[in-house]
Image (cartoon, rainbow, N blue to C red):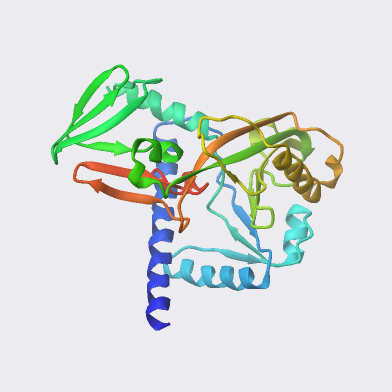
Amino acid sequence: LEVLQAESERQASVVLGLALRNRDLLKGIILRERIDCDFAPRGWLHLTSSEEEEQGVCEEVTLAAQHGQRIELWSRRRIRQEFGIESPFLGRFIPGDGTYHPFKYVCGVLARALRAGVELYTRTRVRAVLSDSPERHRVITERGTIEARRVIVATNAFTSRLFPELSAIRCHQSQIQVTEYAPDRARGRVVTSEHGPIFFNQPRAGARAGFAPLLMGGGDDRSMRNPSSRRRSPRRHAKLLALRDTFYPELRGVPPSAEWVGPMAFTPDELPAIGFLRPGVIVAAGYNGYGGSYTTA
């Protein structure tokens, strides 16, 4: 038990340290490169859903303090005052975290990379990565072969299709919906909960006169065989609406204005797989829905 406790604390410190470095790097890139991606570091509220989870966030506060980070424990009354949410358990609020528009961010990073001389080949399927030596690798594509000294594999949900030995990185589908003109309770802050599970925020770009679009996703991401599939799940749609109406009862009967799905990669221990697959081939995949928290670092 003592060994297990020591190892779990070490692992938790590694994960937290990676997330903190990632946050600082991401913020630095956005500000330095002046990327317009609706960046709003207004805080993240996580609602606990059990006494056991409450105990866990209390321990998180202690761990964060050891890393010089401030995490606030919010009472049920504070949650009700700030968000109008009736929560049966405590919440954890991280002031420095927040939201951004992932697609706008990616486009901004690519534009800066192209300006710096990077060559980008889109819609080019990779069929295999062959390693002739630690310093020579061939990337076989449908448009020809590229030779490289190093290959970074950042294929996430598609990884096991290229590398069958990484079949433990499994594809799951996330379903997200937007409802326009919701009461602006989140005010740019992120809210998450394992009850659902659910995550939502209200981007600032569409905020007007006390209302803002409500971006909500979750409802138990389902496993899928084909990461290219874009078929929505009626069951997840109903679950998302039920969760939405729990937090925003005023929206009952109001249809979402948009809904879409996308592939994510999950690992057995719910931690990303980062490291050398073999000399010269580096894998960074399996972010379990927290790509924004890990990928930059």
The reply to whether residue 124 is visible in this rendering is yes
The percent coordinates of residue 265 (x first, y second) are 48, 44
Lateral position of residue 208 relative to residue 91, left or right = right
Locate the N terminus by quadrant. Answer: bottom left
> In screen coordinates, is 50 left or right of 124?
right
Using residue 21 as the reference point, say whether residue 141 is left or right of it. left
Residue 52 placement (x, y as % from top left): 63, 72
Determine the residue positioned at 74% across, 65% down: 76
Question: Image quadrant of residue 101?
Answer: top right
Give the vertical position of 54 relative to 260 (above or below): below
Q: Residue at x 65, y 53 (%)?
A: 197
Judged left or right of residue 61, residue 145 is left
Q: For residue 179, which quarter of the picture?
A: top right
- Between 262 and 74, the one lying in front of the other is 262
Q: Is residue 52 above or below residue 25?
A: below
Work out whether residue 11 or residue 189 is closer to the camera in this orientation and state it. Answer: 11
Give the residue drawn at x 67%, y 47%: 219
Residue 297 can be seen, yes or no:
no
* Percent of width and height locating residue 116: 29, 24
Q: Residue at x 78, y 38 (%)?
A: 182
Q: Is residue 109 above or below residue 187?
A: above
**Total marks placed:** 0
Q: Residue furthest top?
A: 143
Image position, residue 168 (x, y; %): 42, 50
